[in-house]
Image (tube, helix red, strand yellow):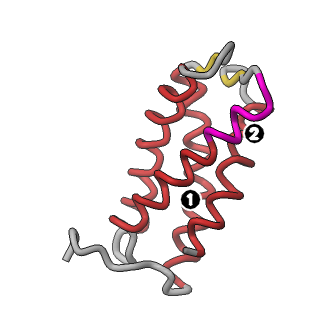
Amino acid sequence: MTGLFVKLIVCPITVIIAWMLFPNVDFAFWYQPIILGVILAGAGHLMEMLLLNKNTVLFSTFMDVVASVIIVYYVSIFFTNTIVTFWGALLTSLLLGVTEIVQHRWLVQERKTKSSPILK
């Protein structure tokens, strides 16, 4: 559960930073990147529960980046007056990937990961 709380803070902040940094990421309203960040946090937490263990840190991070590109690109389409290009979604996802590496290593070191029955 600790991972979810961290993600609920880190993901929206990271999307807001991407909005400020990248010209290909343009949200119309302040709450849109927060909503997107919460959606990314939920999806990322679910993927951590399914994939993350000490042997899959890099794979889990890579899959998070791939899923983030898809989520950022397609969810932003549903926001009013928001423009996020594919490249903007990719850059945002790479920025999220950097935060994910740190989070995944911390979760594994602190033994805060749950073993998934799918990977047993």
Judge whether residue 31 is colored magenta. yes
Residue nearer the viewer, 56 or 120: 120
Residue 16: numbered disc:
2
Left or right: residue 71 compared with residue 11: left
Coordinates of residue 21 in the picture (x, y in percent): 77, 32
Rate crowding at label 2 as few (under 14), some (14 to 19) or many (20 or more) other CA atoms within 10 Å. Answer: many
Residue at figure coordinates x 63%, y 57% from the top left? 99
> For the residue marked with disc 2, what is the amino acid?
Ile
Residue at figure coordinates x 72%, y 24% from the top left? 27
Residue under circle 1? 100
Quadrant in which the C terminus appears: bottom left
Q: Is residue 87 above or below residue 112?
A: above
Residue nearer the viewer, 71 or 1: 1
Magenta segment range? 29-36
Say which quarter of the image contains residue 4.
bottom right
Label 2 vs label 1, nearer the camera: 2
Coordinates of residue 51 in the picture (x, y in percent): 34, 65
Dot 1 falls on a residue whose secondary structure is: helix
Q: Is residue 19 above or below residue 116?
A: above
Judge whether residue 110 is colored magenta. no
Coordinates of residue 29 in the picture (x, y in percent): 78, 25
> For the residue marked with disc 1, what is the amino acid?
Glu
- Chief secondary structure of the magenta span? helix
The number of callouts visible is 2
